[in-house]
């Protein structure tokens, strides 16, 4: 609420959602209900489209730690996704197994020790190494996510392409188009300035969308990425993306009786991190402070 969302959402949209207590999510919650009573509902527009913007922020490789980074004598100059994928999911030998002296094959129960992330490299905001941080929010994915080689070959090989997976999932789950979402929000009193068909046509993949008749009924996931690049130069989500993400995450916090929102404190009557423990005398108000308090940096 106070560190992550302000970094990824447009400030005026986030402020409005918080001040109005996530009105769009509230209507959704009233209509859908709390499920079995122990869980809160999550909109598919969020989980299948809006919150998948991280795929475009990832870099193909990182200055990961002292083993995979800029340090002299490292195993590799960068730690890349293809190396990491060999240790996870449906990975294949040789990297995800070890062979004992007796010839027994043993799988790694966790990532090898030399792959543990060095968080200090990702929290250094000095700007010395800009490639330690995310790429811009736009319609371009990191190359390893365009060909996820751990996925099965054969008839399902097209699922190796993350963009195609996302678009197919949206189609199968009948996710409304971006324009339909904007129209529905307008009916709820929330005005979103849409990006034009011309801007969509002139962007990456625009010609294919025009041939498919999707300029006026654009897949929500793609639209949100394009919107971020156009409206915010990729620094944050655009208006529609910010609204869908903020409404959902703020709405979940507000409607969870166990969240900080419902706990007493001295922040206008609501709990605040400075009401809790303060490792080294400092309240845990940011992700960096959390990592520092955990002893990871």
Image: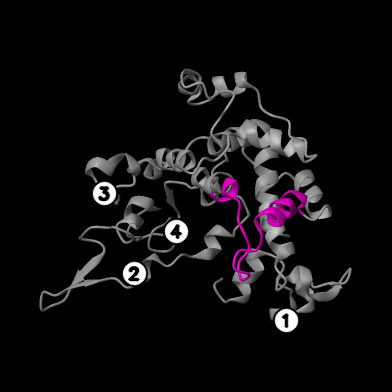
Residue 220's label in the rendered image is: none
The span from disc 4 to disc 1 (Cα, nearest Å) is 31 Å
Q: Residue at x 10, y 74 (%)?
A: 103
Q: Nearer the viewer, mark 4 or mark 3?
A: 3
Foreground of the two, 221 or 103: 221
Q: Would you say 5 lies left or right of 133 here?
A: right
Q: Are marks 3 and 1 in contact (CB under 8 Å)?
A: no
| Left or right, residue 57 beside residue 145 | right
Q: Residues within 10 Å of mark 1 (few under 14, many from 20)?
A: few
- Residue that protrudes farthest toward the left in the picture: 102
Distance between mark 3 and mark 1 Cα atoms: 48 Å
Q: Which segment is the magenta one? A: 22-47
Q: Residues within 10 Å of mark 3 (few under 14, many from 20)?
A: few
Label 2, label 4: how far apart the Cα atoms are: 13 Å
The answer to whether 283 is drawn above or below residue 209 in the figure is below
Please state the horizontal and vertical placement of residue 196, each as a whole percent of the image: 65, 22
**Residue linked to disc 3:** 152
The residue under label 1 is 277
**At numbered mark 1, what does the secondary structure look like: helix, strand or loop?**
loop
> Which sits earlier in the primary sequence, circle 2 or circle 1?
2
Report how far apart the C-alphas of labels 2 and 1 lie in the structure: 33 Å
């Amino acid at each position: 609420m106070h560190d992550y969302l302000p970094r990824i959402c447009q400030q005026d949209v986030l402020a409005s959602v918080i001040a109005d207590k996530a009105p769009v999510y509230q209507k959704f919650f009233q209509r859908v209900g709390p499920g079995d009573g122990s869980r809160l509902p999550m909109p598919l527009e969020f989980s299948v489209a809006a919150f998948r913007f991280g795929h475009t922020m990832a870099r193909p490789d990182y200055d990961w730690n002292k083993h995979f980074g800029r340090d002299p004598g490292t195993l590799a100059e960068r730690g890349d996704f293809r190396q990491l994928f060999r240790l996870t999911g449906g990975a294949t030998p040789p990297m995800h197994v070890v062979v004992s002296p007796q010839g027994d094959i043993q799988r790694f129960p966790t990532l090898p020790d030399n792959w543990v992330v060095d968080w200090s490299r990702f929290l250094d905001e000095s700007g010395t190494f800009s490639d330690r941080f995310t790429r811009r929010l736009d319609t371009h994915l990191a190359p390893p996510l365009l060909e996820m080689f751990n996925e099965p070959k054969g008839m399902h090989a097209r699922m190796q392409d993350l963009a195609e997976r996302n678009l197919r999932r949206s189609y199968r789950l009948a996710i409304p188009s971006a324009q339909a979402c904007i129209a529905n929000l307008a009916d709820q009193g929330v005005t979103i300035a849409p990006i034009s068909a011309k801007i969509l046509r002139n962007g990456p993949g625009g010609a294919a969308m025009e041939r498919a008749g999707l300029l006026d009924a654009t897949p929500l996931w793609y639209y949100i990425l394009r919107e971020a690049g156009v409206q915010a130069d990729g620094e944050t989500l655009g208006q529609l993306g910010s609204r869908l993400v903020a409404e959902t995450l703020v709405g979940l916090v507000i409607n969870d009786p166990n969240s900080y929102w419902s706990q007493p404190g001295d922040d206008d009557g609501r709990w605040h991190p400075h009401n809790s423990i303060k490792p080294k005398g400092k309240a845990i108000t940011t992700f960096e402070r959390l990592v520092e308090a955990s002893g990871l940096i």
